[in-house]
Image: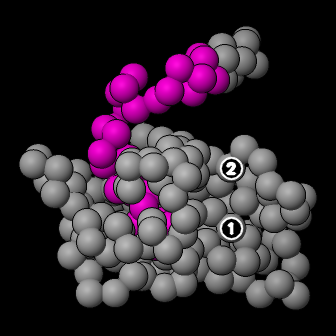
């Protein structure tokens, strides 16, 4: 059994879904929630609040892997920044607790869960509910998205080269090379 924590990062709403994957690739729900921060709070307080809640969930559930949605582009710069900041917190916590991470694009998540990288939010939510045997789609959408990210990781495998597209493998190789150079 593999326990996977999926994160749909966001500064205002951060979706978190924890699933268990059996050897037969059946997924089951452990927990799902959306962490919130007040838009009018100071940035450090917002990031700190979500970070502490994420850390508490990591301590409580002890996941085997943390899967995070990687966003390549968005129209709203402040939204991209919030996503990147919370992703950084999650990556830091994964390193702190020696938990491997996986990054998945929205298209990759949709394809893994629905069979189509162009699926809409409603279709993703319905498939998440179906795969987990839930009577209703988890709400809000950030919750269903976090579960979809965890399910994607479960279906793609933990830390295997088959988890990544050719472009992602090149990106990981470049990132490894860059991090190796910065340590010298």
Visible residue check, residue 184: yes
> On the rendered structure, is 121 left or right of 79?
left
* Among numbered discs 2 and 1, the one appearing first in the sequence: 1
Q: Nearer the viewer, residue 69 or 47?
A: 69
Residue under pointer 1: 10
Does residue 154 belong to the magenta stretch?
Answer: yes
Q: Residue at x 47, y 80 (%)?
A: 33
Task: Kindly check if marks 2 and 1 are in contact, taking CB atoms under 8 A apart as contact.
Answer: no
How far apart marks 2 and 1 lie (CA) works out to 11 Å
The residue range painted magenta reads 144-173
Q: Residue at x 65, y 54 (%)?
A: 87
Q: Residues within 10 Å of mark 1 (few under 14, many from 20)?
A: many
Q: Residue at x 26, y 81 (%)?
A: 134
Residue 138 is drawn in which quadrant? bottom left
Residue under pointer 2: 71
Q: Nearer the viewer, residue 137 or 104?
A: 137
Q: Residue at x 72, y 44 (%)?
A: 72
> On the rendered structure, is 141 left or right of 21?
right
Figure check: 149 above or below 168: below
Q: Residues within 10 Å of mark 2 (few under 14, many from 20)?
A: some
Visible residue check, residue 97: no
Secondary structure type for disc 2? loop
Secondary structure type for disc 1? loop
Secondary structure character of the magenta stretch overall = helix
């Amino acid at each position: 059994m593999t326990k996977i924590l999926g994160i749909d990062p966001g500064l205002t709403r951060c979706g978190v879904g924890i699933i268990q994957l059996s050897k037969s690739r059946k997924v089951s729900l452990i927990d799902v929630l959306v962490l919130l921060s007040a838009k009018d709070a100071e940035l450090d307080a917002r990031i700190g609040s979500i970070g502490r809640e994420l850390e508490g969930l990591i301590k409580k559930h002890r996941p085997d892997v943390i899967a995070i949605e990687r966003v390549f582009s968005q129209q709203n710069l402040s939204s991209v920044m919030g996503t990147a900041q919370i992703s950084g917190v999650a990556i830091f916590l994964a390193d702190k607790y020696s938990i491997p991470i996986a990054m998945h694009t929205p298209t990759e998540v949709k394809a893994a869960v629905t069979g189509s990288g162009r699926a809409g939010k409603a279709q993703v939510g319905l498939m998440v509910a179906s795969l987990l045997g839930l009577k209703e789609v988890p709400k809000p959408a950030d919750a269903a998205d976090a579960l979809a990210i965890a399910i994607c990781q479960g279906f793609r495998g933990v830390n295997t080269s088959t988890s990544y597209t050719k472009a992602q493998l090149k990106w990981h190789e470049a990132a490894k090379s860059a991090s190796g150079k910065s340590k010298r």
